[in-house]
Image (cartoon, grey):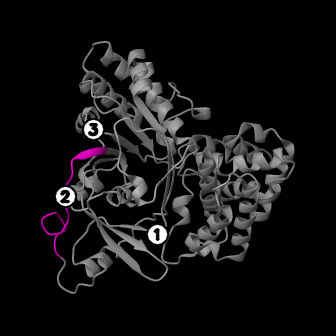
Amino acid sequence: MTTSNTTEPRPFNRSTVDVPPAPQPRLVHIGLGAFHRAHQLWYTQHSEDDAAHPQWGYASFSGRSADLANALQSQDGLYTLVERGPDSDEYEVINGIVEAHPAENVSRLWELLAAPSTAVLTITVTEAAYNLGEGLAFDPEQSAVAADLETLKAAIDGAFGLSEAGVPATMAGKVVVGLAERRRQDAGGLAVVSCDNLSANDLAAHNAIQGLAAAVDPELGAWVEENVSFVATSIDRITPRTEDSVLADVARETGYTDQVPVVTEPFRSWVLQGEFPAGRPDWEKAGAEFVADIEPFERRKLWLLNGSHSLMAYAGQLRGHATVAEAIGDPVCRMWVEEFWDEAAQHLTTPGLDVPDYRDALLDRFSNPRIAHNLAQIAMDGSTKLQMRAVPVLKAERQAGRAGTAAARAIAAWIAYLDGRTEVSDARSELVLEANPKPVDERVRALIAVLDAELAQQEDVVDQINELVDSLK
C-alpha cells in the first residue's frame, strides 16, 4: 500500500481500516516486538489461501514492557509495516495479531496453550532468556530457573494449583505451566518454534522447556518429550529501531495514526526444520524454506550476517561510525568484513548455500542508507553473540591449520570496545565486568575466557588477539 494523504490522520483500528475479519488465534507468540511483527506475522499474512478470510491469527505476548501490547490493543492489533528500500518505502497494514497481551497476563497465555485449536508457539526472547548453561544444557542452578523450579514443584506437590503459581520468572516457566494444562485437558501436541538468533535454537527451546518440565514433574517431562515438537529455524530480516519520524511518515502516506509502525528491509528469509503435530500455516507460499538439515543454513546466517554485524558493531564504533551503512562504507571496515567472510566461507561448503550470492546480497543490504541499523544496538549481549558468531570460525580456521586472523579481529574489537567501560548491556555482564578491569597482561585472557575457556588457554591465540586489540585502539 503506497498512497499519499494530506487530510488529518484518522484513528487506526479495525473499524476505520479496510482489513479482513480477525481470524481465530491459532498461533501464540512470546516476545512481542519489531522482529516478530516484521517476520513471522508477515509470513503468516502472506501464506493465507484466501486473504479476505484468513485462518491463522496470532495471540502475541510482550517479553517485558506492557507498552507495546497496550498500544496494539488500542489499534485492534493492527500496525503498519514499512519496507524501506534504498530509494523509497512500501507501506502495508498487517492484521494478523488478534490479541496483544503484556507478559504478566499468564492466565490468558496458559488458556491459549491449553486450547486444542492452538497449533504453534513461536518465540523471540533473545538468547539470554533461555537461561541455559554451557552447551545449551538445562541449568537448574540459575537463579531464575531455581525460583521457578521451587514454585512449580510446590504447585505440583499440591501446596496450590499451577494456575495459582503467579507469574513465572522465566519464559520456560510460563510455557511449562501452559503445557501442563494442555496435557491435563488432553488437547494433543503442538510445535514450539524458536525464532531467536542462536545456533541449534530448537535444542535451546527443548532444553529450557522440556528440561524444566521434567525437573518439575518427570511425567510432565515425558509428555512434553512425546507430544511437543521443537522446530529449528534460521531467520533473517534486518529490523532496526523505529525512529519517531516514521510515525509522521506513516500518517502522511496512509492517512492513519499508527502508534507502533515497524521499519524493516525488503529482504526476508525463513528456513525451518521439524514437525508440526497440530498443523501450521503454509509459510512456504510466502517464501519460507523447509529443509531436512538446517545446520548449514544456520551457520551461513550466524557467521556471514550476524558475525559481520558483531565485527562492525565494535570495530565500526571504534572508528567513529554509528550505523551498519556507515561502517560498511568505510573501506577498512569493509575489508575486515570481507576477510571475515573469506574465513567463514572455507567452512560453508554444503550444496545449496550459494555463499557468493548471499555475500553479494548482504553488501546490498548493509549499504542501504535508509536502514538506520544502529551499531550500539547490535553491540548488546556481545559475550553471548560472539560465542556463536566468531569463536566457531576462529576454531575452525585453527583446526584447518590457519591463523583465523579475521575471526580473532572480531573478538579483539569487542575487547577494545570494552576498554574502560564500567557498565555494559550484556546478559553476562557480571563476568564481563569482573574481567574488564584486570591488569593489561591479564585482561585479554580473562575476556577471551568469558567467550571460550579453551581458547583462553592457548598462548598463541591470546598473543594474537592482544596484538589485534592494540592495533584497533
Q: Earlier in the sequence, mark 3 or mark 2?
A: 2
Please tell me whether mark 3 or mark 1 is closer to you in this view. Answer: 1
Residue 161 falls in image quadrant? top left
Instruction: Look at label 1 and name its amino acid.
Output: Glu
Instruction: Look at label 2 and name its amino acid.
Output: Asp
Instruction: Look at label 3 and name its amino acid.
Output: Leu
Mark pair 3, 2: CA separation: 18 Å
Does the segment drawn in magenta span residue 51? no
Q: Are marks 3 and 2 in contact (CB under 8 Å)?
A: no
Question: Which residue is under mark 3?
Answer: 109
Residue 39 is situated, as x and y percent measured from the top left of the image, at 41, 58
Q: Nearer the viewer, residue 241 or 287?
A: 287
Question: Which residue is under mark 1?
Answer: 265
| Residue 125 visible to the viewer | yes
In the image, farthest residue toward the front: 49
How busy is the neighbourhood of tag 3: few (under 14 within 10 Å), some, or many (20 plus)? Answer: many
How busy is the neighbourhood of tag 2: few (under 14 within 10 Å), some, or many (20 plus)? Answer: some
How busy is the neighbourhood of tag 1: few (under 14 within 10 Å), some, or many (20 plus)? Answer: many
Residue 430 is situated, as x and y percent measured from the top left of the image, at 57, 41
Q: Nearer the viewer, residue 234 or 461?
A: 234
Q: Residue at x 39, y 78 (%)?
A: 89
Q: Earlier in the sequence, mark 3 or mark 1?
A: 3
Q: Please report the bounds of the magenta region as a residue range.
A: 10-27
Question: Which residue is under mark 2?
Answer: 76
Q: Nearer the viewer, residue 257 or 420?
A: 257
Does the segment drawn in magenta span residue 13? yes
Q: Residue at x 74, y 70 (%)?
A: 335
Residue 115 vertical placement versus 325 (above, below): above
